[in-house]
Image: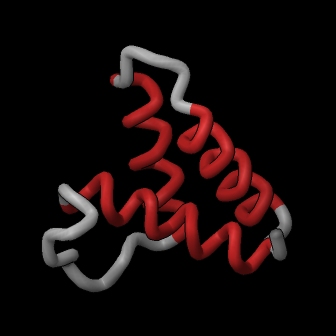
């Protein structure tokens, strides 16, 4: 998966997590990559299972932010 696509999916995941159910209206604007990383990391701390999708999103966001 190209990095830009993975980044947009990671941000969308954080946006959904912040604003609720994926089918409900999302607040605008979407989170920045730094905000998205914070949202995902907080969710990973609170979830009671091994959230592989969240871990992959965290890694994608970390890589993006470290390469800026």
Q: Residue furthest front?
A: 23
Residue 53 horizontal side relative to residue 20, left or right = right
Identify the coloring.
secondary structure
- At horizontal 15% and vertical 77% (from top left) the residue drawn is 25
Tell which residue pokes out farthest to the left in this image.
24
**Quadrant assignment, res 31:** bottom left
Is 5 positioned to the left or the right of 20 in the image?
right
Position of residue 38 measured from the top left corner of the image (x, y, whole percent): 45, 48
**Nearer the observer, 2 or 38:** 2
Residue at 38% across, 35% down: 43
Q: Which residue lies at the image location 34% right of the left edge and 23% below the top edge? A: 46
Q: Place residue 6 in its image quadrant.
A: bottom right
Left or right of residue 10, residue 14 in this image: left
Q: What count of labels does the image hold?
A: 0
- Where residue 23 appears, as percent x and y from the top left, is 21, 69
Q: Point out residue 52 in the picture as x, y percentages from the top left corner.
A: 61, 34
Q: Is residue 45 above or below residue 62?
A: above
Image quadrant occupied by the N terminus: bottom right
| Location of residue 14 in the rendering, given as x and y in whole percent from the top left corner | 41, 58
Indicate the quadrant containing the C terminus: top left, top right, bottom left or bottom right.
Answer: bottom right
Q: Is residue 31 above or below residue 14?
A: below
Quadrant of res 56 = top right
Q: Residue furthest top?
A: 48
Q: Residue at x 47, y 72 (%)?
A: 32
């Amino acid at each position: 998966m190209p990095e830009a696509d993975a980044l947009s999916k990671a941000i969308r995941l954080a946006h959904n997590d912040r604003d609720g159910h994926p089918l409900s209206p999302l607040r605008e604007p979407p989170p920045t990559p730094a905000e998205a990383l914070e949202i995902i990391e907080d969710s990973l701390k609170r979830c009671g299972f091994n959230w592989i999708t969240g871990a992959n999103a965290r890694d994608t966001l970390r890589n993006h932010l470290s390469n800026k």
